[in-house]
Image: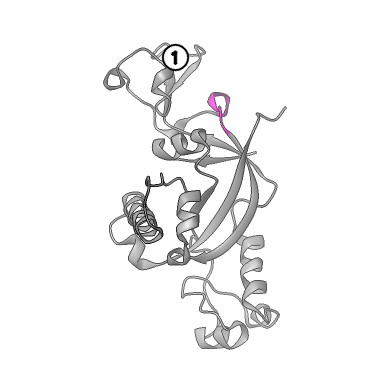
Amino acid sequence: MKPILFSTPMVQAILDGRKTMTRRVMKDCTQFDIEESQLLENTGYNLTHNYKMSIESVGIFSTKEKLLNWFVAKYSKYQVGDVLWVRETWQNYCLGEPNSGFIYKASPELYHWKKESVIWKPSIFMPKEACRIFLRVTNVRVERLQDITAHDVFQEGCLPLNSCSLKECSEHAFNWWINLWNSINGKGAWEENQFVFVYEFQRIEKPC
């Protein structure tokens, strides 16, 4: 099993069954040893300046699909079939007491303290034994951030509007997604249009 971090709103979306997809920026993992134009000639696809490979490697990628599948296999943190345990904002049930059970910021109905009185522990420090949400990766692909569709945005956890036209729903979805992405990755991150790994998943019971 591998850990994965989610913000409190995204944990709530997973618990509600609204979120079955997440995007993560492709981190710089290597550098091109060839001109970008040569990569375009071999694949018909602009992979950006962030990733590089040998001329010998590029030669085997006759299509965009083969190239991107290669990146998934070689560089994706998660692969199809992987089981992920979700790290979320948490605290011990009896504040400060070890081995007392756990509470979660995404589920305020589970504790009687006012939210303001809880000193939450960041998700990055959540131990595996505190995990309550497990996911299985069902698909992985690579795409530009701005290639996301309105349908995908709703799979990312966006709440739909009531009684809206297709255009209104799409505008609502994209505005929500752009604001969310920039809030997580920094102002202007949407405009950078980076390559991302797209992970689709389904929630499962805790593995034995």
Of residues 200 and 97, which is closer to you in this image?
A: 200
Specify the segment rendered in magenta. 128-133
The residue indicated by pointer 1 is: 93
Image-quadrant location for residue 166: bottom left
At label 1, which amino acid type do we have? Answer: Tyr
Of residues 17 and 142, which is closer to you in this image?
A: 17
Residue 198: x, y in percent? 54, 57
Residue found 59% across the figure and 50% down from its top? 200
Residue 95: x, y in percent? 38, 14
Of residues 75 and 156, which is closer to you in this image?
A: 156
Residue 57: x, y in percent? 67, 77
Q: Magenta stretch: residue 129 in it?
A: yes
Residue found 62% across the figure and 85% down from its top? 42
Residue found 32% across the figure and 56% down from its top? 175
Report whether 170 appears left or right of 117. right
Tell me which colouring the rendered structure shows: one colour
